[in-house]
Amino acid sequence: DTGVSQDPRHKITKRGQNVTFRCDPISEHNRLYWYRQTLGQGPEFLTYFQNEAQLEKSRLLSDRFSAERPKGSFSTLEIQRTEQGDSAMYLCASSRGATLYNEQFFGPGTRLTVL
Amino acid sequence: AQTVTQSQPEMSVQEAETVTLSCTYDTSESDYYLFWYKQPPSRQMILVIRQEAYKQQNATENRFSVNFQKAAKSFSLKISDSQLGDAAMYFCAYRSATGGSEKLVFGKGTKLTVNP
């Protein structure tokens, strides 16, 4: 049973560029979550998918951010026109759903640095 | 909106000793779940222990246990017989059990150092 994987692990980009991150959840998990973690803070929820449907979005997810999960498997998170304030660790998590605690399993994250 | 507060940015403990990490939360809901996650340096976050608000009995997982005080909205984590591998950031998290939201709301974390 492989865990949640994220690619790339690190991304350095210049302000104004677009970036895309990928998350592959645990294979039998139908729920997928994106969080953002800045230095010295806990993760903050961005969005959540159940299968291919995006069911919840945070107000943190501005118009420059878009997430997709086209076939209910992997997901992508795109940030357009990056700003220095977007520098953070972007965490993906997945869960099986339909369980009491619906435990979320986290990936290693993608660290974004915007210059 | 729910909030989670961890009032101890850093804690340290001697190897083999016991340490307690504090967490308080604010909610108007009666049913919810609480979690403690561990994030080792440069490694991914893993679940340590979990508790449902309706369960009176405090959860335990080997050396890890919680003190859940629902009326006080407190959810502290006790680590017994601390080991060097316990050194990490620890995050307390809240999830609603109603309304369909599945997001975790995290505190700012407590950095635990274990001294040999």
Image: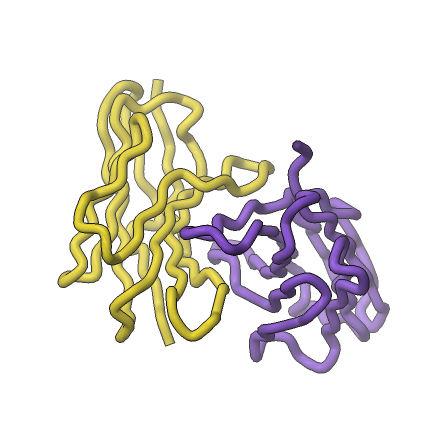
Chain colours: A purple, B yellow
Residue in view at x 73 percent, y 52 percent: A23
Give residue B87's quadrant in the image.
top left
x and y, in percent, of residue B4 in the image:
34, 62
x and y, in percent, of residue A25 in the image:
69, 48
Q: Vertically, is A47 above or below A90?
A: below
Is residue A2 shown left or right of residue B107?
right
Residue in view at x 30 percent, y 53 percent: B52
Task: Specify the farthest residue to the left.
Answer: B71
Task: Specify the farthest residue to the front.
Answer: A98
Quarter of the picture containing the N terminus of chain B is: bottom left
Quarter of the picture containing the C terminus of chain B is: top left
Residue in view at x 16 percent, y 54 percent: B69
Depth order, front residue of A80/A3: A3
How many numbered marks have been drawn onto this rendered protein structure? 0
Task: Specify the farthest residue to the bottom.
Answer: A63
Depth order, front residue of B51/A21: B51
Q: Vertically, is B83 above or below B112?
A: above
x and y, in percent, of residue B107 in the image:
39, 58
x and y, in percent, of residue A67 in the image:
73, 68
Give residue B49's quadrant in the image.
top left
Q: Vertically, is B34 above or below B37?
A: below
Give residue B37's quadrant in the image.
top left
Residue in view at x 42 percent, y 75 percent: B99
Depth order, front residue of A64/A12: A64
